[in-house]
Image (spheres, rainbow, N blue to C red):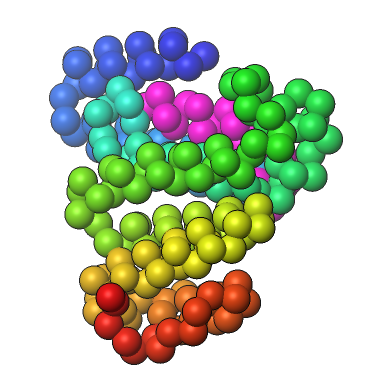
Amino acid sequence: MGRLLGWMVAATLAASGHALAADTAKDAMGKVGSAMNYLDKLGRPVPAEEDLKDAETICKALHDDDCLGQVWRAWGYYFRSDALARWKGAKVYGPALYDPKVKFEQRYERSIEYYDMALQLYEKLGNPHWIAHLELQKAYAYNAMNRHEQACQSLQASREADAKYENGKAHGPQGKTFAKFLDELDSAGHCPSRSSSAPPQ
């Protein structure tokens, strides 16, 4: 379906121009949202994978870096998700049916690869908001592999990016400032203690 969808998107865009391009990007984000719903609420990684494959095809056909960054961010989450870890088929067939070379034990490494791919796009776009969130997600993946030093490095990179976004006033879970949330994760991950108000080094 991926190749056919890519051909259809490219042909439609050529015929209809930029107005349709925005609608198609929304379609891709709709598929990302659907994939997240499959993962977080329904525990179904297989249809989530199909949605992400289709979304990636659309974003590539559009040559839309922001769109593709969101898809790669979602792929990063897919590989570290609880839904994938609980699915028995992931241990038998591998965590990605479209990419059989990736083994179940390698899913966190693959997660970080996708987060790094997305980070490269958002660094090029100069978007500290998504850089902060992507580095935070990387920290979760590193922590799951017991690679705490790298988790702490990602948390610090997240903190530094957040300091550039609304001057560190962005809010994380439970209404806490993102910096405060990162402070708590620092403590849980045995990172060197830092003041949330301290400027990045």
* Vertical arrangement, residue 151 with respect to residue 60, above or below: below
Question: Predominant secondary structure in magenta?
Answer: helix
Q: Position of residue 5 (x, y in %)?
A: 42, 16
Q: Quadrant of residue 156?
A: bottom left
* Vertical arrangement, residue 72 with respect to residue 184, above or below: above
Query: How many marks on residues?
Result: 0
Q: Position of residue 183 (x, y in %)?
A: 49, 81
Q: Residue at x 27, y 12 (%)?
A: 11
Q: Residue at x 76, y 23 (%)?
A: 93
Q: Residue at x 34, y 57 (%)?
A: 131
Q: Quadrant of the C terminus?
A: bottom left
Residue nearest the viewer, comparing 25 with 70:
70
Q: Kindly tell me whether residue 40 is visible in this rendering.
A: no
Residue nearest the viewer, comparing 66 with 17:
66
Residue nearest the viewer, comparing 84 with 62:
84
Q: Kindly tell me whether residue 96 is visible in this rendering.
A: yes
Q: Which residues are magenta?
A: 39-58
Q: Position of residue 178 (x, y in %)?
A: 42, 77
